[in-house]
Amino acid sequence: MSILAKINQRESLKKVEEIKPILYTQILAVLSDEPQTAREIARKIGRYTRQDVQPRLTELMKLGIVKEAGKKKDKKTDRNVTAYVLDGVKIDPPGNEIQVKAIKL
């Protein structure tokens, strides 16, 4: 890999690390409603492609915060894809507050 490619890679990684907390928050907000695919989440949070959120979903799954909820038909590709929901969510009825496991960012 060339020196310029390594510099570009580091710059890209730095930007991803800066926006991770924002993406985590946006993804969790969308998933609090109902199971969603990566493409549906991306569209709802203003991202262009599912590739913008899929890596974050994988990270949230590894942390035990998100889990697979089954399959949904992707309207764009006409294929079955994975849908995701929150895992470990506790809803407190009096204030309708949602508590999610702590995320170390």
Image (cartoon, rainbow, N blue to C red):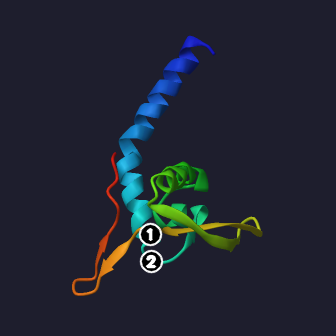
**Residue 19 pos. (x, y %):** 39, 45
**Residue 25 pos. (x, y %):** 36, 59
Q: Quadrant of the N terminus?
A: top right
Q: Residue furthest left?
A: 95
Q: Residue furthest right?
A: 78
Q: Secondary structure at mark 1?
A: helix
Identity of the residue drawn at 55% across and 16% down: 4
Identity of the residue drawn at 35% across and 50% down: 21
Identity of the residue drawn at 39% across and 68% down: 29
Q: Give residue 40's quadrant in the image.
A: bottom right
Q: State how many labels appear.
A: 2
Residue denoted by label 1: 30
- State whether residue 43 is above or below residue 8: below
Identity of the residue drawn at 32% across and 57% down: 102
Q: Relative to the observer, which residue lies in front, 76 or 32? A: 32
**Residue 16 pos. (x, y %):** 44, 40
Horizontal side of residue 3 vs 65, given as left or right = right
Indicate which disc residue 33 carries: 2
- State whether residue 31 is above or below residue 96: above
Q: Give the residue type that dot 1 points to.
A: Val
Q: Relative to the observer, which residue lies in front, 71 or 40? A: 71
The answer to whether residue 17 is visible is: yes
- State whether residue 48 is above or below residue 18: below
Q: Give the residue type that dot 2 points to.
A: Asp
Within 10 Å of disc 1 (Cα), the crowding (few <14, some 14-19, many 20+) is some
**Residue 101 pos. (x, y %):** 35, 61
Residue at mark 1 to residue at mark 2: CA–CA distance? 6 Å
Instruction: Determine whether label 1 and label 2 are within 8 Å by CB.
Output: yes
